[in-house]
Image (spheres, rainbow, N blue to C red):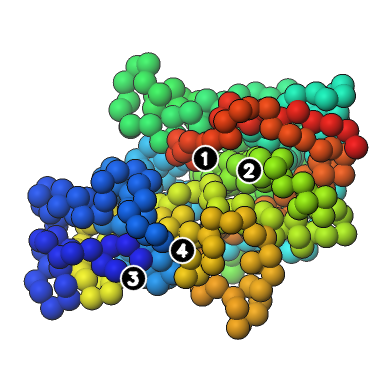
Amino acid sequence: MVGSAPMRHERGMQPAGDRAESQPSPRDAQQLRRAVGPGPDRQVRPGVEAVAVRQADGLLAGAAANKFVFFSGALALQQPRSVQRILGERSILELVGADHRRVRGALSEFLRPEMLRSYVGKIDGEVRRHVEENWAGGRDAVVTVLPLMKRLTFDVIASLLFGLDGGCGGGARRDALAGEFERMMEGMLAVPVDLPFTAFRRSVAAGDRARRMVAEILRERAAALARGEATRGSDLIACLLSLRDDRGERLLSDEEIVDTAMVALVAGHDTSSILMTFMIRHLATDQTTLASMDLTKMKLTWRVAQETLRTVPPILGNFRKALEDVEFDGYVIPKGWQVFWVASVTHMDGSIFPDPSRFDPSRFESQSSSASAAPPCSFVAFGGGPRICPGIEFARIETLVTMHHLVRRFRWKLCGKEDTFARDPMPTPRDGLPIQIEHI
């Protein structure tokens, strides 16, 4: 099922009114995958993309389909088994119903606007240090953007989540956590075969070591709170430890806090680093936009970020699982089927975003205007519905601060002859995006 045009009915996806089987047979799934399309990221016709996704029984795209996926209570988020094992069974990604609302509400406390304003100084300090150490070298220096952005976003998020800064011993501890985190991410989406020497086994082991480090920080922060040496606003761990329910008891268990911190570490690191890398990639060949971005034009900078997210969404999409037979657009999705929603299909739909291949930040100027705004659930780089990313405003602040320092001090050009990227599963520019920088 792609956009508003459902796939042809064969046996599995049945029109409403027909009898829907409760479980898809192997033949049903094979037929549906054949109907979905011939291969990964294959363009079938303008505005419609078909993706053959391993283990997916159906694919949904388009604003109406996105709304259905995000808000339907009959579809549950379905993470790969490798993600479940590495990030924990009590993470916000796995919880549903009241437990999900409770943990999401706790995380939202840390991300309230007044809290975010207090983090700007920490973010700015980390960005200044990073630029001085990694970008401000000799004239016409060459840097590789993606690994630098990954380390910057990790340092920022480690400072805010765990209070690990670059001084007073925090630097060595942060470096150790960064190493385990990098090894954990390498097998995050690997085939979950738990055998020696597999990427999954290495990732699980690194994730377990990282979790033990986070658990140790949790115990230290609990003791500091008890002694009055830390406050609710010190970092995420202190914030979550401080929350109480109506009976005065801890709102989250230790396991839930560790799992929540692990998810926040992944979410606050990967997507932001990809976003800023691809902003730099585009601006290398768009000097007009680059010259227009400065501290007084933060709205323009964020529109550039939004347009980057539209054209190269860090998250291709994700899975939902049908908890019961559910109907969409006249077709029944049987209970037990997995559905994969895809962001890029909607983002490149010319009926929603005219001339979708053109990079045009101005298209986001009108998003507050009812006359010209894109329909709801059209721009879905952050997801949507009850599970929309709670860190949107944090990502905006981090991006604006970082890009301000880079744009104010440097101009750059691409070094590679081929300006290409691949998805694995996130978009990765060729060779990590080496650029030659020039001090202004």
* Number of residues whose C-alpha sits closer than 10 Å to that of mark 1, classed few (under 14), some (14–19) or many (20 or more): many
* Residue bearing the label numbered 1: 427
Among the 4 quarters of the image, the one containing residue 40 = top left
Identify the mark nearer the N-term, 4 or 1: 4
Identify the mark nearer the N-term, 2 or 4: 2
Q: Residue furthest bottom?
A: 371
Amino acid found under the numbered disc labelled 4: Asp
Residue displayed at 61% across by 82% down? 370
* Number of residues whose C-alpha sits closer than 10 Å to that of mark 2, classed few (under 14), some (14–19) or many (20 or more): many
Asked if residue 257 lies left or right of residue 4, the reply is right
The residues bearing labels 3 and 1 have C-alpha atoms spaced at a distance of: 27 Å
Return the x and y of residue 264 as percentages of the image width and height: 59, 46
Asked if residue 69 is positioned above or below residue 398 in the image, the reply reads below
Residues marked 4 and 1 touching at CB (< 8 Å):
no
The residues bearing labels 2 and 1 have C-alpha atoms spaced at a distance of: 9 Å
Amino acid found under the numbered disc labelled 1: Pro
Return the x and y of residue 165 as percentages of the image width and height: 78, 34
Identify the mark nearer the N-term, 2 or 1: 2
* Residue bearing the label numbered 4: 349
Q: Nearer the viewer, mark 4 or mark 1?
A: 4
Identify the mark nearer the N-term, 4 or 3: 3
Amino acid found under the numbered disc labelled 3: Ser
The residues bearing labels 4 and 1 have C-alpha atoms spaced at a distance of: 20 Å
Q: Nearer the viewer, mark 2 or mark 4?
A: 4
Observer-nearest residue: 80 or 226?
80
